[in-house]
C-alpha cells in the first residue's frame, strides 16, 4: 500500500515588480538577509508562481496546445506552459544590482509579470545549471539559442506568458 503524499507548504518570499522599464524582484523583509552575497553572481534563477492560473482546471491540465508550434500538443512536463499540477515556473535572470537593505534585486529578462509571487531565488552555478550536448524537441526549431538581450518585451500590467 502506498502512502499518501504529505502536503507541501510554500509561501511567497517576494514579488516581481515592473515599473518605468525596469524589473525588480522585491524580497519581503523577513527574507532579506538571504540576499547576502547574491551580488557576487552574474545570474540568479527566479522561481515564481503562475498565480493567474491558480484555478483547479488549470492545475489539472496535463497536455496542452503549443502556441509556438502550430497544431502540436505536448505534456506539461515537456513544455513551459504555466498550466500544470504545480504552478512553479523558473527563469534564469541576469542580475543588474542587489540591495539587501531594501530587498530589491534588479534583473533583466524575466517572463513573469508585475505582481507575480516569487517563491525562491537560487544563484546560478554553471557547473550544475547547464549541460553539454543538450538537445531540444524539434517543435522548438527556430527559437534563438540564447535569451534575447532586449528581453521578451513584456510590459507592465500584462499577464504571465508561460514560455
Image: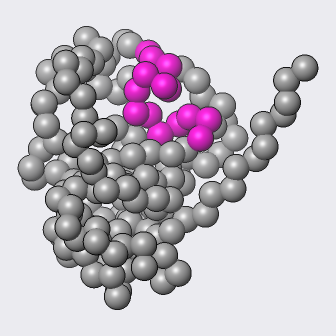
Instruction: Find out whether residue 48 is within the magenta segment.
Output: no
Which residue, as the protein is rendered here, is positioned at the far front? 127
Vertical order, 59 against 70 (above or below): below
Report which quarter residue 70 is drawn in: top left
Q: Nearer the viewer, residue 162 or 38?
A: 38
Q: Position of residue 97 (x, y in %)?
A: 19, 73
Q: Is residue 17 left or right of residue 11?
A: left
Q: Residue at x 16, y 42 (%)?
A: 147
Which residue, as the protein is rendered here, is positioned at the far right? 1
Q: Position of residue 32 (x, y in %)?
A: 43, 79
Instruction: Find out whether residue 74 is within the magenta segment.
Output: yes
Which residue, as the protein is rendered here, is positioned at the far left? 149
Q: Residue at x 44, y 68 (%)?
A: 15
- Total labels: the figure holds 0
Q: Is residue 24 visible?
A: no
Q: Is residue 143 left or right of residue 122?
A: left
Give the quarter of the figure containing the N terminus.
top right
Give the quarter of the figure containing the C terminus.
top left
Image coloring type: one colour
Q: Position of residue 135 (x, y in %)?
A: 24, 17
Vertical order, 49 against 132 (above or below): below
Q: Position of residue 138 (x, y in %)?
A: 25, 11
Q: Nearer the viewer, residue 106 or 37?
A: 37
Vertical order, 112 against 107 (above or below): above
Q: Residue at x 63, y 57 (%)?
A: 10
Residues rendered magenta in the picture: 73-86
Q: Residue at x 45, y 17 (%)?
A: 74
Q: Is residue 81 visible?
A: yes
Q: Nearer the viewer, residue 121 or 127?
A: 127
Amino acid at each position: 500500500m502506498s502512502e499518501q503524499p504529505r502536503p507541501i507548504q510554500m509561501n511567497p518570499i517576494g514579488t516581481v515588480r515592473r515599473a518605468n522599464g525596469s524589473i525588480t524582484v522585491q524580497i519581503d523583509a523577513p527574507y532579506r538577509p538571504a540576499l547576502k552575497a547574491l551580488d557576487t553572481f552574474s545570474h540568479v534563477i527566479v522561481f515564481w508562481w503562475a498565480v493567474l492560473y491558480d484555478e483547479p482546471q488549470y492545475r489539472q491540465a496535463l497536455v496542452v496546445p503549443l502556441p509556438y508550434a502550430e497544431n502540436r500538443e505536448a505534456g506539461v512536463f515537456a513544455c513551459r506552459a504555466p498550466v500544470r499540477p504545480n504552478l512553479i515556473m523558473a527563469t534564469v535572470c541576469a542580475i543588474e544590482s542587489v540591495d539587501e537593505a531594501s530587498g530589491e534585486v534588479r534583473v533583466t529578462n524575466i517572463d513573469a509579470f508585475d505582481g507575480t509571487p516569487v517563491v525562491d531565488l537560487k544563484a546560478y552555478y554553471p557547473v550544475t545549471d547547464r549541460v553539454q550536448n543538450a538537445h531540444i524537441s524539434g517543435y522548438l526549431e527556430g527559437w534563438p539559442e540564447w535569451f534575447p538581450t532586449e528581453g521578451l518585451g513584456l510590459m507592465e500590467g500584462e499577464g504571465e506568458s508561460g514560455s
